[in-house]
Image: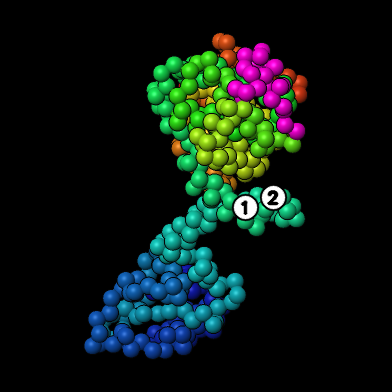
Amino acid sequence: MVISRENNANFSVKPTSLQGGVVGGNRRALGVINQNLKDCGPNKKISDPVHRPITRTFAAQLAPTKQPLPEENKKSSLNSNGFKECIFVDEEHKSVKEQPVPMSLEQPEEVMQTETYQMEVEMEDIVEDPIMDIDCSDVDNHLAAVDYVHELYSYYRNMENSSCVSPNYMSQQFDINERMRAILIDWLIEVQDKFDLMRETLFLTVNLIDRFLEKQSVIRKKLQLVGLVAMLLACKYEEVSVPVVEDLILISDKAYTRKEVLEMEKLMLSTLQFNMTVPTPYVFMRRFLKAAQADRKMELLAFFLIELSLVDYGMLKFPPSLLAGAAVFTAQCTIHGFKQWNKTCEWHTNYSEDQLLECSKMMVDLHQKAEKGKLTAVHRKYCTSKLNYTSKCEPASFLVANQL
């Protein structure tokens, strides 16, 4: 780089001469700074210094001259061969204020783009929802089975297919239909509420009914008996205090005798091969609600939605785990007013938002119709102060509105 008088005026050094030429009184000897000009010898073609390969150190030293040199300086800047002298300023003779800007602030464009990309990746990692450890608070709770809870639910997922029934099994029945099934289950939900039975009992009751009807043809006047016996068996399996046979006969308005109840109980157990341990939607609901960090409001709303699904025959096409996941997802959407399904819920349920959407839309449709028609047992059950008037919540209609 060629240094002009104006550029060198800032260097407070003693005057000297450069290759016989006298330099101004406010300039120091540049021969000391650039002692070796071998690259500018007669045998090498010297290009303009601006076009030399630029390294970071070299770039820091460059400060191109914008003003032309006077004629006398142009002459003195040429060597004997007619080429320009390559004059550089030594950094060790500069004051601290005159030192160049650190090159870390003048990164090449490719390096800056790489660093910007890395920063964006790091920011994405920070913004992404982490997967929470939902079992860390239950380490000391032996009933939570933290040490092998993941193995348990992996087993449930493998076994849930055995507890499912064909969504078209009713076509094999010659005297009953889906409407009769819906009436039966709607009535049993009311019985479960009146007897104050556990939720586990209700879900197992519905499961036993469907599995039995899939394998055994039943006439319509015996359908209520099937429901009563299924609830009796579920109570024996889940409840501490089991209703006696006489109580069930009484609520059926004495439509059946004790002998008929016991005979149906034997038939149902033999048909199902005494297989009572099956994963129902309730098993998955408890786990998925925990993953969603649900409060009481969300829990009640999720159970309200899934009990509506128990009545509807069309929901049999979904496995229990998907029903539970869709109920939790729909409850979140109903409460918050927008779609919400974080990484923790997706990881513990093994279902993405897209996989749940079809079932969720059907649940919203059931929610909108819950108060209408004759089958309103679920709505009336959840329209009490004991259950926080959950059925009065406005359905997540935006999920259904976007389906077209």
* Element marked by disc 1: helix
Q: Which residue is mark 2?
A: 144
**Is residue 243 part of the magenta span, yes or no?**
yes
Q: Position of residue 246 (x, y in %)?
A: 71, 22
Q: Position of residue 99 (x, y in %)?
A: 55, 73
Which numbered disc flags the more N-terminal residue, 1 or 2? Answer: 2
Q: Quadrant of residue 264?
A: top right
Tag 2: amino acid: Ala
Q: Residue at x 57, y 10 (%)?
A: 374
Q: Which residue is mark 1?
A: 149
- Which residue range is magenta in the image? 241-261
Tell me if residue 389 comes above or below residue 374 in the rendering: below
* Element marked by disc 2: helix
**Is residue 168 part of the magenta span, yes or no?**
no
Q: Quadrant of residue 367?
A: top right
Q: Residue at x 52, y 65 (%)?
A: 105
What distance separates the C-alpha of mark 1 from that of mark 2?
Answer: 7 Å
Q: Position of residue 149 (x, y in %)?
A: 62, 52
